Image: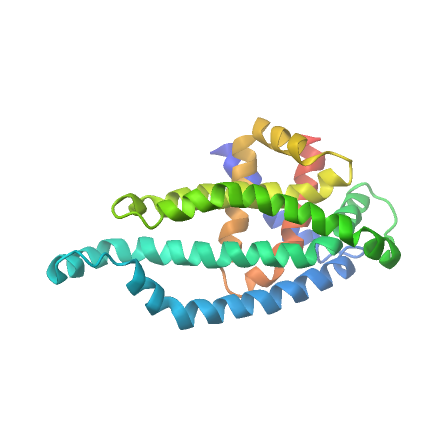
């Protein structure tokens, strides 16, 4: 539990870092991307919620039994729908913000080292954009490798009662892995090596990912999640993992 809370505190630290001089200018564009996408995610979730809930209800159950079970499974299915929607939009948001997250991680590292802030390196961002997008697609393939069987499991009657718990664990791990990629990639650490490093501090990593997942589901707070998570992951890597 100590490790879980320690990892979660790094996300809170990230929220503080993105407002500091020399860092906040690098966080503006990811915040703008996140604001647009999560506003759309919230609208989509509200407008389609009833349809998705009805489609997940087993049709073979008697109506009286279904009415009783609704009091039990409604919170679970609500959590499952929210996790799927926000996790999906987190992937898209990170894909679009990837070219800026690398330089944000650099800016945070410079700040933590006590060095003078730098200007936004637009030429570097443009030059490295294809590589960053390819890196995001590679991470997406890794996500899909686990996402597809988990999604199928979520639709199997009875078994899908534990699906929200599995989604929480899976999402926490993937978000931690995703955001730690930026500071680690700046130190030329490959994706396979990153996974091994994070596994050595699994509870610390999951604590950070769980806090990030929770923040993505809080309206308005989720607009700031991407830069805050990049900043927090950078601090965690430098102080606890490097």
Residue 21 figure quarter: bottom right
Residue 120 relative to residue 99: left or right: right
Residue 239 figure quarter: top right
Q: Residue at 61% of width from left, 69% of height from top?
A: 36
- In the image, residue 223 sits, relative to residue 199, either above or below, namely below
Q: Residue at 42% of width from left, 44% of height from top?
A: 150
List x then y, in percent, for residue 39.
54, 69
Asked if residue 229 can be seen in this view, the reply is yes
Q: Residue at 32% of width from left, 53% of height from top?
A: 76
Residue 17 relative to residue 64: left or right: right
Question: Which image quarter holds the C terminus?
Answer: top right
List x then y, in percent, for residue 222.
56, 60
Count of numbered tags: 0
Colour scheme employed for the rendering of this structure: rainbow
List x then y, in percent, for residue 61.
16, 56
List x then y, in percent, for residue 120.
84, 58
Q: Which of 164 and 151 is in front in this view?
A: 151
- In the image, residue 42 sits, relative to residue 165, either above or below, namely below
Asked if residue 10 can be seen in this view, the reply is no
Residue 168 relative to residue 205: left or right: left
- In the image, residue 198 sits, relative to residue 136, either above or below, namely above
């Amino acid at each position: 539990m100590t490790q879980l809370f320690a990892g979660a505190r790094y996300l809170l630290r990230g929220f503080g870092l993105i407002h500091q001089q020399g860092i906040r200018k690098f966080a503006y564009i990811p915040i703008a991307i996140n604001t647009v996408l999560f506003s759309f995610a919230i609208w989509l979730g509200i407008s389609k919620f009833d349809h998705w809930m009805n489609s997940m209800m087993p049709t073979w159950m008697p109506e009286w039994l279904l009415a009783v079970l609704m009091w039990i499974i409604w919170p679970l299915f609500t959590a499952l729908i929210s996790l799927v929607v926000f996790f999906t939009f987190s992937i898209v948001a990170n894909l679009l913000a990837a070219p800026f997250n690398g330089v944000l991680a650099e800016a945070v590292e410079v700040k933590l080292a006590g060095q003078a802030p730098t200007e936004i390196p637009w030429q570097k961002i443009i030059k490295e954009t294809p590589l960053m997008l390819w890196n995001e697609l590679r991470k997406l393939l890794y996500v899909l490798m686990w996402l597809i069987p988990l999604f199928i499991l979520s639709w199997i009657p009875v078994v899908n009662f534990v699906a929200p718990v599995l989604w929480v664990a899976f999402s926490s791990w993937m978000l931690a892995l995703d955001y730690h990629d930026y500071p680690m990639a700046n130190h030329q650490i490959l994706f396979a090596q990153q996974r091994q490093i994070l596994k050595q501090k699994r509870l610390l990593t999951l604590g950070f990912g769980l806090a990030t997942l929770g923040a993505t589901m809080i309206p308005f707070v989720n607009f700031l999640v991407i830069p805050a998570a990049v900043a927090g992951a950078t601090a965690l890597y430098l102080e606890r993992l490097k």
